[in-house]
Amino acid sequence: GEDVEQSLFLSVREGDSSVINCTYTDSSSTYLYWYKQEPGAGLQLLTYIFSNMDMKQDQRLTVLLNKKDKHLSLRIADTQTGDSAIYFCAESISDYKLSFGAGTTVTVRA
Amino acid sequence: GAVVSQHPSRVICKSGTSVKIECRSLDFQATTMFWYRQFPKQSLMLMATSNEGSKATYEQGVEKDKFLINHASLTLSTLTVTSAHPEDSSFYICSARADVSDTQYFGPGTRLTVL
């Protein structure tokens, strides 16, 4: 079956880097995603990585993929107060479906 | 690009009534739309997959007669919660997948409260 796991909470000081980790189980996943959810809102696609890539960088965001260990991470450089949100890791499974982790609540403190 | 809207954003209804939620892809054609339910402080639970012009595929444990899904066009899917009860109160989120992409784009969600 599919199972995505994330740590539930992360507290980071403004200006520091945040690293959110995720493990997944479906080795056939083609894409892995990071979504951001602010309170009362839907999910915003932050970035995604194709399974044959090791790293993807997009401005302040860096995604690292270790396919052997089925480990995915999201690094946010220079974390700002507007980065406070819940971050969901998701893997693509059959029939274009996504399997989500429980979400990591990131709190940015001044 | 890739904007998905939902309407209404918030609805309060009495127990026993039916509520319809619309999901629209505004700037692309969505071959597939997905409906999720999210409980407070929890992850998204996939309810069903909706393909344009065909019957929706429901996940295990989701009552198809309770949650009616219609995907009449490539830009619109609707979820109707029939005979709603307080336990149906939740945050319902839709997503849409463009024909040429695996990526799902999410709507802003609909908060349903059943009194």
Image: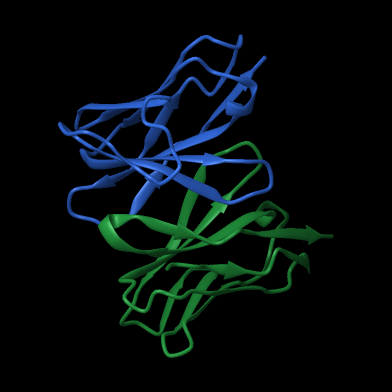
Chain colours: A green, B blue
Tell me the residue at 61%/9% (across/down): B14
Whole-percent x, y for residue B49 in the image: 31, 42
Above or below, B82 against A15 in this view is above
- Residue pushed farthest right? A110
Is A86 in front, or is B48? B48
Left or right, B43 with respect to B54, comes to right
Total labels drawn: 0
- Residue pushed farthest left? B53
Quadrant in which residue B11 is drawn: top right
Tell me the residue at 45%/42% (across/down): B61
- Residue B80 visible here: yes
Quadrant in which residue A47 is drawn: bottom left
Above or below, B97 against A14 in this view is above
Left or right, B45 with respect to B57, comes to right
- Residue pushed farthest bottom? A68
Quadrant in which residue A15 is drawn: bottom right
Left or right, A2 with respect to A52, comes to right
Whole-percent x, y for residue B70 in the image: 28, 26
* Quadrant, the N terminus of chain B: top left
- Residue B108 visible here: no
Whole-percent x, y for residue A87 in the image: 59, 58
* Quadrant, the C terminus of chain B: top right
Whole-percent x, y for residue B57 in the image: 29, 41
Left or right, A80 with respect to A73, comes to right
